[in-house]
Amino acid sequence: MKKILWMIPVILVSVGFFSCSMGTDDDDDDTNPFAGTWESTVTDGVSRKIIMNNDLTWEFHQSASGDAQGDTRGIYTYNGKTATAISSELYTGTAWMSTEGQPTNVITVTAEIQDDGKLEVTAYDGTFTYTRNN
């Protein structure tokens, strides 16, 4: 009888871990409206894209010649269709450099998914529109 009583907590803990692992990771990924690749609507010969990952990291790539200088990456949070992204690193052409010490308004960007599905991004230097690529 003591062996059976000892097994009950083990079974309950096992069931708890199993039910937690069954659930929401995949479901949560599907509910993040920002996850994916977004491309700029500007057609000036410069490729601009934002990659927003389900793990709440993001990357910005901008290039006319395929180089990576000026690429940026960081983290973001979102609430509904509004996100706030903060840059943590900038690529200088040879290495990634921390943005620590930079003014908050320079390294913080807001983004909002519009009713037409486009992403409106507001940064210190203006407002830009992106469309989902995937």
Image (cartoon, rainbow, N blue to C red):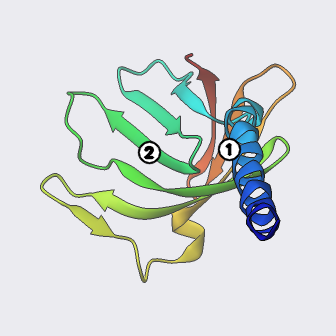
Label 2, secondary structure: give it.
Answer: strand
Name the residue at 33% across, 47% down: 71
Residue 121 on image: x %, y %: 65, 43
Residue 93 at what x, y percent from top left? 16, 52
Mark identifier at residue 59:
2
Which quadrant, please, contains the N terminus?
Answer: bottom right
Q: What element carries label 1?
A: helix
Quadrant containing the C terminus in the rendered view = top right
Q: Mark 1 points at which residue?
A: 21
- Compared to residue 76, the image places residue 62 above or below, namely above
Q: Which of marks 1 and 2 is nearer the N terminus?
A: 1
Q: Name which residue lies at 71% across and 37% down.
A: 22
Image position of 132 with respect to 9: above or below: above
In the foreground, 21 or 129: 21
Give the amino acid at mark 2: Glu
Q: Nearer the viewer, mark 1 or mark 2?
A: 1
**Disc 1 residue type (three-letter):** Ser
Count of numbered circles on the image: 2
Q: Residue at x 77, y 44 (%)?
A: 19
Pointer 2 local density, CA inside 10 Å: few below 14, some 14–19, many at least 20: some
Residue 46: which disc? Answer: none
